């Protein structure tokens, strides 16, 4: 069985036990490690993997072939993307700062980008000049150097942006939670509808449980794939993104997903979804 997920600490932490044969009943895995913008594209290909971690923003394009699994992904509170600016270029932190600005984003098919577009529509007085897509690890240096006026950042950038002398303009997660009182849907785990979805769900939950019960077992694996991230940042990443929603989305998780995708569809950012295709397969 082939699976694609990111090398980020939360994903390697969650899937460590399954990848390493600790879930005895589970099928063996052939793993593709790829950043989420790449897995979003992989999911659209004819020979796509059986299971993938993708952005919730990409879900409407693949729901006919793939089912959303109720576990294994990233959804929570206090873990949203940030919009960063550099004080050395302009100490004014008002939202009007983005009028006519060039803003770097990691992907145009990501939850971060959906949240940014929804926030900007409500909060930015006039049009943003240009959206520049670039790898997420290049965004903070670009803001620091003045190549762009602001940057939308995700992942461990929440913990490291002060090293670049940058300032948070807005925490989009905080904005979303105030707007909706719901958690933030970030990364989804999907599997082909032709597979035994109940079994895959059971194996992922067992892998999550194993990770929590043996927190040091995955340490070497996590750091091997953490792209030179130090161990403290990696642990902060895990602590933030692996939570009760990782084990079970529950009613609140599904409500958050539907709210995000319905709002985005209303703005023409994603195709409208069939709510029946979001049903819990477990």
Image: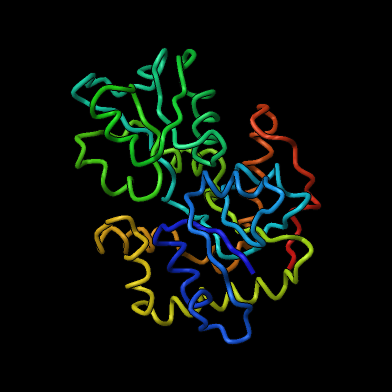
Q: Where is residue 116 shown, x and y percent of the image?
A: 49, 32
In which quadrant of the rendered image does the N terminus lie?
bottom right
**Residue at 49% across, 14% down:** 127
Left or right of 271? Residue 249 is: left
Q: Quadrant of residue 83?
A: top left
Asked which quadrant contains residue 96, the reply is: top left
Looking at this view, is 55 or 138 the one in front?
138
185 versus 208 height, above or below: above
Query: Where does the image place residue 33, in percent across and percent down from the top left?
Result: 48, 58
In the picture shown, does residue 216 fall above or below 31?
below
Q: Residue at x 79, y 64 (%)?
A: 194
Question: Which quadrant would residue 60 be assigned to in this image?
Answer: top right
Q: Residue at x 57, y 37 (%)?
A: 109
Q: Is residue 208 above or below residue 7?
A: below
65 relative to 248 in the view: left or right: right
Quick one: quadrant of the C terminus?
Answer: bottom right
Q: From the viewer's perspective, is 110 left or right of 233?
A: right
Nearer the observer, 270 or 18: 18
Q: Pinpoint residue 126: horizontal percent, then vertical percent.
A: 48, 12
Q: How many marks?
A: 0
Left or right: 210, with 94 as reference point: right
């Amino acid at each position: 069985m082939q699976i694609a997920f990111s090398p980020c600490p939360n994903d390697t932490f969650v899937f460590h036990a399954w990848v390493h044969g600790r879930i005895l009943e589970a099928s063996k895995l052939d793993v593709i490690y790829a950043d989420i913008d790449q897995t979003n594209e992989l999911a659209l290909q004819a020979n796509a993997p059986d299971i993938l971690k993708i952005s919730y923003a990409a879900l409407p394009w693949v729901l006919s072939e793939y089912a959303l699994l109720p576990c294994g992904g990233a959804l929570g509170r206090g873990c949203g993307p940030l919009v960063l600016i550099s004080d050395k270029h302009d100490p004014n932190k008002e939202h009007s700062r983005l009028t006519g600005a060039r803003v770097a984003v990691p992907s145009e098919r990501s939850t971060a980008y959906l949240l940014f577009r929804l926030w900007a529509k409500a909060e930015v007085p006039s049009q943003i000049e240009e959206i520049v897509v670039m790898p997420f690890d290049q965004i903070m240096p670009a803001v620091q150097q003045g190549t762009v006026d602001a940057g939308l950042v995700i992942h461990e950038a929440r913990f490291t942006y002060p090293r670049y002398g940058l300032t948070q303009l807005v925490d989009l997660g905080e904005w979303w939670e105030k707007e909706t009182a719901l958690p933030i849907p970030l990364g989804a785990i999907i599997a082909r509808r032709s597979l035994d979805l109940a079994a895959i769900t059971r194996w992922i939950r067992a892998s999550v449980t194993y990770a929590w019960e043996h927190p040091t077992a995955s340490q070497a694996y996590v750091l091997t794939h953490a792209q030179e991230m130090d161990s403290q940042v990696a642990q902060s990443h895990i602590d933030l993104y692996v939570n009760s929603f990782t084990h079970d989305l529950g009613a609140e998780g599904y409500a958050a997903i539907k709210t995000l995708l319905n709002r985005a569809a209303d703005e023409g950012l994603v195709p409208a979804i069939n709510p029946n295709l979001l049903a819990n397969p477990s």
